[in-house]
Amino acid sequence: MLWGAVFAVIVAGGALGGYALADGGGTSADGKPPLTDLPPSPEGVRTAARAFLDAWQRGDTGAAAAGTDDAKAARAALTGYREDARIAKVRLTPGRASGSTVPFSVKAEVSYEGKRKPLAYRSKLSVVRRPADGKVLVGWAPSVLHPQLRGERDRLLTGEAGTPPVKAVDRDGKELDTEKFPSLANVVDGLREKYGEKSGGQAGIELRAVHGEEDGKDKKGAAAAGGRKGGKEDQPDTTLLTLSEGTPGTVRTTLSATSQAAAEKEVASRQKASVVVLRPSTGEILAVANSNPTGFNTALQGSLAPGSTMKVITSSMLLEKKLAEVNRKHPCPKYFTYGGWKFQNDDKFEIKDGPFLASFARSCNTAFISQAPKLSDGDLTAQAQEVFGLGRDNWAIGVPSFDGAVPVQSDAQMAASLIGQGAVRMNPLNMASVAATASTGTFRQPYLVSPELDNRTLAKASRTMASGTVKSLRELMRYTATSGTAAQAMASVGGDMGAKTGSAEVDGQKEPNGWFTAYKGDLAASAVVQAGGHGGDSAGPVVAAVLRAGG
């Protein structure tokens, strides 16, 4: 150990023994306060630190532990440092003490199954008096071994880095590089967690700080995938040194590199935008993108009020119940009060003696609220679950997702749900699926990994829409895309298409969240731009661009 000029030279025998008598505890003869009430002297700090670090460096675990105020815990941790963390050839160099704190640097070597790598870091220790007798000792804490050990159950471990890494490829076998497609970083984390063991890869070797768990299982994937709730005992492991990167396995996805590139381009130029593209005939997810690729995966896991895009589901219900017909006159007053709430339209417009087609295309809120007295509290929930496959918490897309929520509500909250407010919650994945179901009449659960890979069962809806309802709903959405609130955004799309705009009010937010959901041929897409304002202006161009790009 290199002590240099930092610690004074203490002559063995006389000086060390004399110091032990002077700083060892007890009551002084002159009546001054006992040493147990005083901080360790500078020389006492140096001596205790030197003894501990010397013993640790030479591998004398017993002596090092005995030099602390918690010999049992220190012995276990120091033993684990050598046997579990596989750290050897330890060289410790103390720095200049500051009061009772002594910083020191560590240089060592980590080895595991023939792989070796040097390790270097800095730590510190504190010297204290034992209350019982005033003996000067190192105050034990896991952070003495390494500053990343913050809790009593934290420990160091060297071994396989949990689940093997994975390489995601698109539907055609092209690698989906997360540098080129940054929004897929969270998706790849989820794929690793679920399919890493089955993908043919080999885990890397690393030294890591295990936080809280005794078994040392890797928690990084679970945390990234949203599979673990946050909490002190659920912190992801911290990688301190990588001995080998490991070999990634390959997971084939349903994603399309072409569609993903278009989606990435659109969200990159906006703040808080998220989009999903899928294929209605199969449910295959073609693209997933978020403006903040390293943040929360709003596209798949978000839980936001969908605003007027919810009127697609509500309209299908009204059509089935004969409460509305495409070309039949339908009320759209400026205001409608229900459950004690006064609802109104954007800019307080009204449509006098107009058909339901006009109300849908202009997104008339009161056209839907006015039907609330004729509905039961659970009608919208049943429609969302039974026809659109939403809100049952049973989707299995291959990575973590939120399946939408349309809870049973009453009075004003039930009425608000009809226009996508209240407690209704969706994300772009859910609303792209809604557009797909509206297009075909049949719910097909979206998926990002083929169920054949792991024999999982995809969710099914209990019934399909009647053919007449499908025809009417498609007519409503097509008219909206050509002559309604979605017309400007969809003008460049063309073909067999339909769309619906939405704007969802959020408490404390100046501008509403902008929503847009649409289909073109065998493509469906939905986007949200949080605080983006009107959906046709904010989210509409995103959806139009990915539909034009194709799949």
Image (cartoon, rainbow, N blue to C red):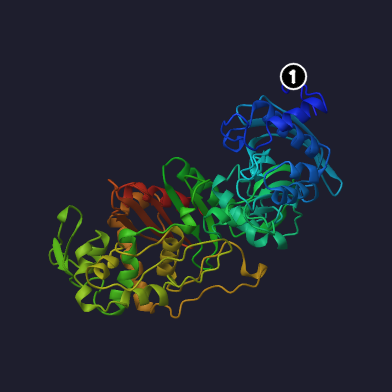
Front position in the image: 348 or 300? 300
The residue that label 1 is drawn on is: 5
Which residue sits at x=28%, y=77%? 377
Q: Residue furthest top?
A: 5
Residue lying farthest to the right in this orientation: 114
Q: Nearer the viewer, residue 332 or 548?
A: 332
Task: Locate the N terminus by quadrant.
Answer: top right
Indicate left or right for 379 with 219 as reference.
Answer: left
What is the three-letter code of the residue carrying label 1?
A: Ala
For the point 50% across and 76% down, which residue is it? 460
Residue 473 in picture, x, y percent from top left: 34, 69
Where residue 344 appears, x then y in whole percent? 17, 59
Q: Residues within 10 Å of mark 1 (few under 14, many from 20)?
A: few
Q: Is residue 390 visible?
A: yes
Q: Is residue 274 above or below residue 353?
A: above
The residue lying toward the viewer, choosing from 70 and 284, is 70
- Report whether 313 appears left or right of 56: left
Which of the 4 quarters of the picture holds residue 68?
A: top right
Q: Is residue 138 left or right of residue 362?
A: right
Against 469, residue 3 (above or below) is above
SS at mark 1? loop
